Amino acid sequence: MANCIVNYGFSAFILFVWMAINIFLFVYFYFFYDLGPQFFYTRHLLGSALPWARAPAAVLNFNCMLILLPVCRNLLSLLRGSFVRCSRTMRKQLDKNLTFHKLVAYMIALMTAVHTIAHLFNLERYNNSRQGLDDELSTALSDLADTKNTTYLNPVRITNLIPTYFAFTTIAGLTGVVITLALILIITSSMEVIRRSYFEVFWYTHHLFIIFFAGLVFHGAGRIVRSQQKTNPPHNTTFCKDRPDDWGQIPECPIPQFAGGFPQTWMYVIGPMVIYLCERLVRFIRYMQRVRYKKIVMRPSKVLELQLIKNGFTMEVGQYVFVNCPAISQLEWHPFTMTSAPEEDFFSIHIRSAGDWTDRLIEIMKKVPEGAEGPKLGVDGPFGTASEDVFDYEVSMLIGAGIGVTPFASILKSIWYKFKDSDPKLRTRKIYFYWLCRETHAFEWFADLLQVLEKEMEERGMGNFLTYKLYLTGWDQSHATHVMVHFDEDTDVVTGLKQKTHYGRPIWDKEFEQVRKENPTSIVGTFLCGPEALGKVLEKKCAKYSDVDPRKTRFYFNKENF
């Protein structure tokens, strides 16, 4: 329980505060419209659908204010440490920006559904009142209008209205339809299966948020929900509601005046919109900065390595960049973790064939003559991730799956440079590195680095500093036979390393128990770059093997999120 509080306590607190604000806004505005005397006549026309439409609108305003902030990458990097040295706990929350973005999106979707359904009922009630199908008071309220037609209560101004006519001829109706359609397309294209298999569909459809926010700003300008205004003499609703024929005829019952509320949505979203525009401006400036090629290398298993140079570019271990190739698409940007170390005079990325965009980029790079410049690239970043904090722990567990090893390549390279330069600031004293791959070729490009590190540690008498285990999760019979024949050799037949390759998947209980036994009083940072399913397993193991006593071993789980 103590470890759960340490790992999830602040996240739970943020979630609680966010949910509490949502609940407060819903309840407050529900009763504001359900009990407010200025909405007495409006409620008579619409019934309970009025508060059910307006309460979700207040929640929508709040969440639309939040939805853009988690995707302002430069803002998050600023908060993460560029100028403000926030705590480790706070940085972990910033690493969950996309999770919060999704939660806010789910709330927007739910409140939009409630808001839309309630207003459909409102439109039906307005239309019935206009046609005189309800009681005498409803008919009298619907007939109200001055010569300029500005003090009406019922926005349906013609008899026998077709609902679709109202939807496409009023500001509120038209913008509501556009907002809802845009939101449906954004949410459906964000489903995991579409995002993974058809990233371009997800990418382009997500930019409908521009239309969504434009419609949102103007949606309230229709002012279809109207409230009673003060008059002199005042209109006594309790006395006058049963005497609509006397309105304007006796002093106690002047003709009631109504007006729509001032649009407020723009006040909620203008700030985040300005921040996001600045974010896009920074991205555009970075896009225009020239990127030069140092080296283009095709690695095994359809992995492309690009070594790039950009003036003024500085990085930390484990960070990532967004890459754009105009020859493929002017608009698409894809994230890649950097595999180079901060000590190097270039930055590198490894790109695996994983879709149309990466396939086309690899094909283009294959055709570039050796030593020649490749196609123009735009690079935005770098941006911080959880792996950036690896050197804040005395003991670290690094787990990579497939191409997910890339942030740890940067970390291990940086460690090599720190040892080479005898960096006194290096506080890390032990690293456990696990790499899971399905095929043997994937090990080849990374094995060279491990061999150099292995040799460096031995020469310095620090063979115990780095414990690494490579796991091959897929093999055939011929490979198994080959391994059996060469089993007694000093080096591994797959990687050439002294540490032999393991076959199958790690037994995580055994691994965590060993780490806890070897580090009885340490805080262990556990870092994963890999699939969500593995993340859930490791997260549970971190909680299971952490000791309640803060003086003993505790595991902190960190996962890369893009």
Image (cartoon, rainbow, N blue to C red):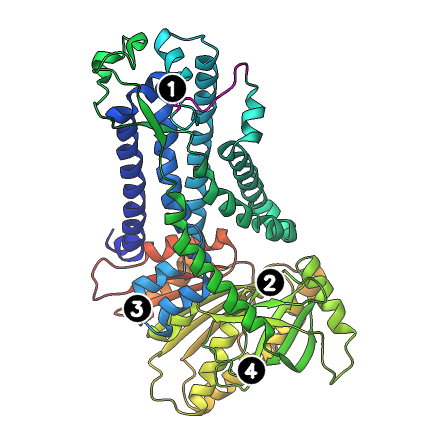
Residue 257: x %, y % from top left: 32, 25
The residue under label 1 is 46
Q: Earlier in the sequence, mark 4 or mark 1?
A: 1
Q: Which secondary structure, mark 2?
A: loop
Alpha carbon distance from label 3 to label 1: 50 Å
For the stretch drawn in magenta, the main secondary structure is loop
Q: Residue at x 68, y 67 (%)?
A: 326
Alpha carbon distance from label 2 to label 3: 28 Å
Alpha carbon distance from label 4 to label 3: 36 Å
The residue under label 3 is 86
Residue 461 vs 101, above or below: the answer is below
Q: Earlier in the sequence, mark 2 or mark 4?
A: 2
Q: Are circles 4 and 3 on residues that touch, CB within 8 Å? A: no
Disc assigned to residue 451: 4
Span colored in magenta: 152-160
> Which label sits in the foreground, 3 or 1?
1
Q: Which secondary structure, mark 4?
A: helix
As rendered, which of 226 and 184 lies closer to the eye?
226
> Which label sits in the foreground, 4 or 1?
1
Residue 293: x %, y % from top left: 66, 81
* Horizontal side of residue 558 vs 453, given as left or right: left
Q: Are circles 2 and 1 on residues that touch, CB within 8 Å? A: no
- Kindly identify the amino acid type of the residue bearing the numbered disc 2: Trp
Alpha carbon distance from label 2 to label 1: 48 Å
The residue under label 2 is 333
Q: Which secondary structure, mark 3?
A: loop
Disc assigned to residue 297: none
- Kindly identify the amino acid type of the residue bearing the numbered disc 4: Gln
Quarter location, residue 147: top left
Q: Residue at x 71, y 67 (%)?
A: 361
